[in-house]
Every structure is written in C-alpha cells, then in structure tokens.
Image (cartoon, rainbow, N blue to C red):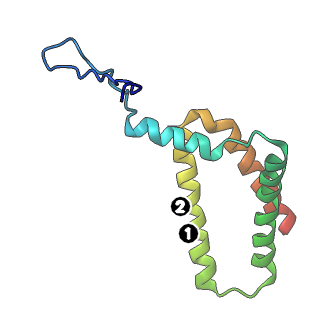
C-alpha cells in the first residue's frame, strides 16, 4: 500500500475562469463544397489516377456503344435522355456553386465526351 501513487484530478468549478475553446463548425454550404471538392478531385497516387482517367473514358464508350448497337425501346431511350439532361443541369449547378472544381470537372467531362465519341 505504500507503493501506490496518488492520482489528482482537477475539476474546474463553475465560478472559475474555465472556458472551453469552441470547435468552429462549418456551415452546410461549406460542407457541401468540401464534399464536392473531395469527390471530383483527382487522386494523389499514380495508379489510382490512371484508373480514374481510364474509367472516365471506357465506361461512357461502353454505354454509347450499347446505345448504338443494341435494340433499346424508345421509352427507355427517352428516359435516359431525360436522366442525362438532369445530370447536365446538376453539373452546371455544381460548376457554378463550387468554382474550385472547375478545372477537374472540365477534365472529367472532356474525357467522358471522348469516351462517348469512341463508342460511336
């Protein structure tokens, strides 16, 4: 019992000068912007970046090839065109709302356009 160390815990009183430092909270708009910046930014390491850029070309090429070669019913084609128009409008909104992603977004849209042209 003589070898035991005493642990002293100080509890601040309400009357003392203890004031916790508040953690700054980001607004919802700032969280939205940071989320889009992280989502659109290119990866740092080379293998992941090569995969991202290749998939930005290959996947649209596959879809546009299927669009041309497979007999898809007209209502499905119209639905897909409507879906693409909604995606384009939201893309313009993100470009306007988050100007930090303008260059990366332009690169990705350009690669997707190249993939679509390859598939045709």
Mark sitting on residue 82? 1
Residue 85 relative to residue 19: left or right: right
Q: Secondary structure at mark 1?
A: helix
Indicate the position of residue 56 as horizontal and vertical percent values.
Answer: 77, 56
- Verify CB contact (< 8 Å) between mark 2 and mark 1: yes
- Judged from this view, the residue extending furthest toward the top is 17
43, 2: nearer the viewer: 2
Q: In the rendered image of this protein, does residue 102 appear above or below residue 19?
A: below
Mark sitting on residue 25? none
Q: Quadrant of the C terminus?
A: bottom right
Identify which residue is drawn at 60% across, 64% down. 84
- Judged from this view, the residue extending furthest toward the left is 15
Indicate the position of residue 107 as horizontal and vertical percent values.
Answer: 75, 44
Number of numbered discs overlaid on the protein picture: 2
Indicate the position of residue 97 as horizontal and vertical percent values.
Answer: 50, 39
Indicate the position of residue 36 as horizontal and vertical percent values.
Answer: 56, 44
Q: Secondary structure at mark 2?
A: helix
Query: Marks 2/1: CA distance?
Result: 6 Å
- Judged from this view, the residue extending furthest toward the front is 2
Q: In the rendered image of this protein, does residue 20 appear above or below residue 81?
A: above
When asked about the image quadrant of residue 83, the answer is bottom right
Disc 2 marks which residue? 86
43, 104: nearer the viewer: 43
Q: Residues within 10 Å of mark 1 (few under 14, many from 20)?
A: few
């Amino acid at each position: 019992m003589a070898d035991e160390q005493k642990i002293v815990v100080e509890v601040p009183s309400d009357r003392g000068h203890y004031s916790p430092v508040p953690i700054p909270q980001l607004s919802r708009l700032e969280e939205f912007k940071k989320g889009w910046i992280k989502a659109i930014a290119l990866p740092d390491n080379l293998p992941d970046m090569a995969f991202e850029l290749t998939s930005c070309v290959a996947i649209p090429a596959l879809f546009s090839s299927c669009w041309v070669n497979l007999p898809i019913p007209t209502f499905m084609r119209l639905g897909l065109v409507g879906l693409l128009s909604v995606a384009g409008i939201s893309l313009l909104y993100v470009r306007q709302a988050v100007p930090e992603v303008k260059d990366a977004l332009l690169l990705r849209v350009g690669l997707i356009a190249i993939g679509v042209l390859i598939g045709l």
